Image (cartoon, rainbow, N blue to C red):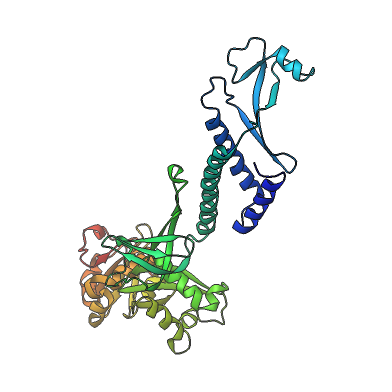
């Protein structure tokens, strides 16, 4: 064994070098010594099973067998007779735990090497635990990584002390990834199962999550970072278009203007990071009708009728604005519905005039006034323009 106090000196030096607490390393050393001792005495039928280890500057490592004082000894490895216990100390009584120093005089090189291997593994586990603790705090945040490896189903991203994996389902449509590329990713989940505690923590990341847009704006817009401007909701079809609703806590600050920035400088940086994805910044409103009308921007909305019970809005737009309101393949209306949380049924002024005679109870204008007395066939109306 090492000279007296050398073990503690080594532990303290290792703790400082690895930025790990002395207590964690001592625990690993104790487990390593127990494993080494059990291997050393494995051929003995009466080898003690219950062990404790004491590490001190005076004795370095001592191994103690813990045995129960029993009237009749049935298992020498775990029990000791009352007579033998009193031979060690007259104060022992039945049921007491006796700790006997069983450190072998020649607890030498082979045993020490076994202990070293176990200690190394335990220290690796402690290090991985520190990595897990570090990255679990980064869930729902943005990290900048370097693409390491690319295959059809996954992109592996170096994130510093660990590796992230970008599943193919989280690829941004049309975006290509090459080894060495620097990309910003949104951390979806950091995990390790009970069976995989010895493995480096797994970090799942995304390029399509709406949270990526939110975090990018927090980085670029000081008013969002300080809470003066709040992002109320985001609807995103990654690689194509995003709608984001914002509100200001200060009447003197325009939330949309703050996000756009001088000459569009702030929003342009986000758009660039998202490979020219279009971003509509919408002013949020507590009034559902106003919010829905804003969400359909850039289309002009003439009227919004709402059914609060079914959370459906019927939006009326000029005839020449119908296609713009719906958007290519229904995208504008679809994102507006996701952004607001309301079903949206878009009609042109001509279509609305044709249906006006059928409109009735429960359908109100944005200001809450009922526009007809009775409306029994609402669910039977055409839903070709309704977007959920």
Indicate left or right for 381 with 270 as reference: left
The residue drawn where x is 21% and y is 62% is 381
Q: Which residue ends up furthest to the top in the rendered image? A: 72
Closer-to-camera residue (277/280): 277
Against 132, residue 91 (above or below) is: above
The residue drawn where x is 47% and y is 70% is 215
Q: Which residue ends up furthest to the bottom in the rendered image? A: 263
- Residue 174, quarter of picture: bottom left
Q: Indicate the quadrant containing the N terminus: top left, top right, bottom left or bottom right.
A: top right
The residue drawn where x is 58% and y is 12% is 74
Closer-to-camera residue (64/322): 64
Q: Which residue ends up furthest to the right in the rendered image? A: 90
Against 105, residue 15 (above or below) is: below
Residue 49 place in picture, x, y as percent: 57, 25
Residue 354 place in picture, x, y as percent: 20, 72
Q: Can residue 284 be seen in this view?
A: no
The residue drawn where x is 37% and y is 73% is 180
């Amino acid at each position: 064994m090492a000279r007296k106090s050398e073990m503690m000196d080594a532990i303290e030096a290792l703790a400082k070098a690895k930025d790990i607490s002395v207590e964690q390393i001592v625990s690993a050393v104790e487990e390593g010594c127990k494993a080494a001792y059990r291997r050393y005495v494995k051929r003995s039928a009466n080898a003690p099973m219950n062990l404790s280890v004491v590490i001190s500057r005076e004795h370095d490592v001592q191994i103690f067998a813990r045995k129960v004082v029993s009237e009749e000894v049935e298992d020498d490895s775990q029990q000791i007779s009352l007579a033998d216990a009193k031979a060690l100390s007259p104060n022992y009584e039945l049921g007491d735990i006796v700790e006997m120093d069983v450190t072998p005089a020649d607890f030498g090189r082979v045993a020490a090497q076994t202990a070293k291997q176990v200690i190394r593994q335990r220290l690796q586990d402690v290090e991985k635990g520190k990595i897990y603790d570090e990255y679990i705090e980064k869930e729902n945040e943005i990290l900048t990584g370097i693409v390491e490896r690319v295959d059809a189903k996954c992109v592996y991203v170096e994130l510093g002390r660990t590796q992230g994996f970008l599943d193919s389902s989280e690829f941004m449509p049309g975006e290509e990834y090459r080894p060495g590329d620097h990309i910003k990713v949104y951390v979806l989940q950091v995990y390790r199962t009970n069976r995989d505690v010895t493995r480096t923590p797994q970090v799942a990341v995304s390029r399509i999550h709406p949270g990526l847009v939110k975090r990018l704006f927090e980085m670029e817009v000081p008013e969002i970072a300080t809470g003066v401007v709040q992002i109320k909701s985001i609807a995103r079809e990654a690689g194509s278009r995003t709608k984001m609703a914002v509100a200001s806590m200060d009447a003197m600050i325009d939330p949309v203007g703050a996000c756009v920035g001088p000459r569009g400088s702030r929003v342009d940086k986000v758009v660039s990071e998202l490979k020219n994805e279009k971003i509509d910044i919408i002013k949020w409103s507590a009034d559902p009708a106003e919010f829905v009308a804003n969400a359909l921007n850039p289309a002009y909305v003439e009227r919004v009728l709402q059914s609060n019970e079914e959370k459906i809005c019927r939006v009326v737009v000029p005839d020449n604005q119908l296609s713009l309101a719906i958007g290519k393949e229904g995208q504008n209306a679809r994102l507006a519905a996701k952004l607001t949380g309301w079903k949206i049924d878009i009609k042109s002024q001509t279509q609305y005039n044709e249906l006006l005679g059928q409109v009735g109870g429960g359908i109100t204008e944005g200001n809450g006034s009922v526009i007809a007395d009775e409306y029994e066939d609402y669910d039977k109306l055409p839903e070709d323009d309704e977007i959920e």
